[in-house]
Amino acid sequence: MTELLSYGFMRNALMAGVLVSLACGVIGTLVVLKRMVFISGGIAHTAYGGVGLAFYLGVNPVLGAITFSLLASLLMGYIQRKTRQRPDTLIGVMWAMGMAIGIIFADLTPGYKADLMSYLFGSILAVTQSDLILMLIVDVLVIGVVILFYKEFQATSFDETFARARNLPVDLLYVILITMIGLAVVMLMRVVGLIMIIALLTVPAAIGALFLKHMNKIMWLATGLSLVFTTGGLLLSYTLNLTSGATIILISGLAYLIALLVRRLCPRCSE
Amino acid sequence: MSAAQEMNQPLVEVQNVYAGYNHETVLEDINLAIQPEDFIGLIGPNGGGKTTLLKVILGLLEPRQGSVRVMGKSPRRGRKSIGYVPQFAIFDSDFPISVHDVVRMGRLGPDHLFKPYSEKDDAIVDERLAWVDLLEHKDRALSELSGGQRQRVYIARALAGEPALLLLDEPTISVDIEARAHIYDLLHRINGHGVTILLVSHDLNVISKYVKTIGCLNRTLHYHGEKELTAEMVNASFGCPVDLIAHGVPHRVLEEHEGQP
């Protein structure tokens, strides 16, 4: 362990795990309770279009990812709430279109493209100091916003009609939440890659919701679980020489299956 | 007390309202004035527009035609004086939340953004929980409560906003008979405290015992601000007498009312 910590990249990776877990626990809980899992997946995959475009233009891919992710968030949020079309179909189409745009721009970009893969599958070991600073900023934003509007997010997640009848700015709160999801997605992209983001965003909160009956407690447990999954996955992948993102996700998925089994075998095992 | 109430004007005035979704018209030419301290029961078959009417009053659905005034204002401005108890079915009964936190939602509003709940909020929340006999359960998770208890939580939540008017959408659906009586007794007491009530239900039997005035709603509204339910009103709303049986309304109730003026 001490030997591992002597590597700068490993220290950065572990730190990234901590920062990502904070956002995952908090935002993931709202995603799960508000049933926004699919839309989060759509945002993540559409962000790849931004990564490809940024590569083509020769700018920082994170910038492209943030732009696309925020645009996708707003557009999908609008689709989800306002159009008469089946929203899941439209979101599914955007999901694939984003990926396609990313790949086409990658084709058009001359030279070495291995870096593009790291956005698909994550590269927690390649996290830099400036990535960590970006993650810290996202954490502060996300957690700050959720603390500020906690009771309103709780109310709109539980019963939006009632919240609207109480004159709460339901639509604005939705836009704020989906923007936070967009930011969290970009941050998670570095760690597990955008293909696997959904799992890390939802599994910790979903396990929490199986056993706990208060939203804030679920957020805490989800943060803790997410930390266990990222750190555990990172160390395991290092030891066994496996891809870190995929290892993290497999551990999360296994934990979820075990949690479901425990819940089924032991109905009283909840708060 | 607002100027509208002092002049004994209706809390809600619905005039010539037509409303619906997409291409479907659900409400036709609705006229309704809700007088202070009334306890109105509106019955009607499923799909008869009961929920739609409540949504129009709450400003959640724009009518196609006609006007709605709540406390003399537009529904969006006036609705803070309304406590809404939505239909049971819309809730995720597994949602992780405590009873206390649900009732606190009734205190929310634009004034409460960026502010934590105050001691006054919590005092009102506790008082309302006591009204519905659930104060000792305030820290329990909502999902642990029975259907009847949960319904009372939603009533407490609506009352936490200190409303002049309570709107209830099928408050006794999926609740057993004993809990049903408890809820109606509770509403009777709340009405006694000066809170006006509008309740919609397809449950004619129970309603007629507790309400002060009664009406029938099925696309069109038959309401005359009276307690008696005439055969014509029921027939007009539920359709022919064969339908009456199909909707579970026994003839006995109808016959009793037929003899009255």
Image: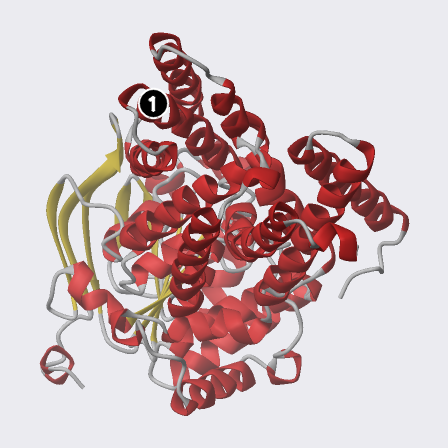
Type of colouring = secondary structure
Could you say where residue B81 lies in the image, as x and y percent from the top left?
26, 73
Residue appearing at x 30%, y 25% in the figure: A58
Residue A136 spot, x, y in % from top left: 45, 57
Q: Looking at the rendering, in which quadrant would you find the C terminus of chain A?
A: bottom right
Identify the residue shown where x is 40% and y is 65%. A144
User: Position of B252 compared to B261: left or right?
Assistant: right
* Residue where numbered disc 1 is placed: A85
A80 on left or right of B174: left
Q: Nearer the viewer, residue B71 or A250?
A: A250
Q: Secondary structure at mark 1?
A: loop
Q: Residue at x 45, y 34 (%)?
A: A39
Q: In this view of the protein, can residue B85 be seen by the observer?
A: no
| Residue sitting at x 32%, y 37% | A63
Query: Vertically, is A154 above or below B27?
Result: below
- Which quarter of the image is occupied by the N terminus of chain A? bottom right
Q: Quadrant location of residue B259? A: bottom left
* Residue lying farthest to the right in this orientation: A265
Closer to the camera in the image, B46 or A34: A34
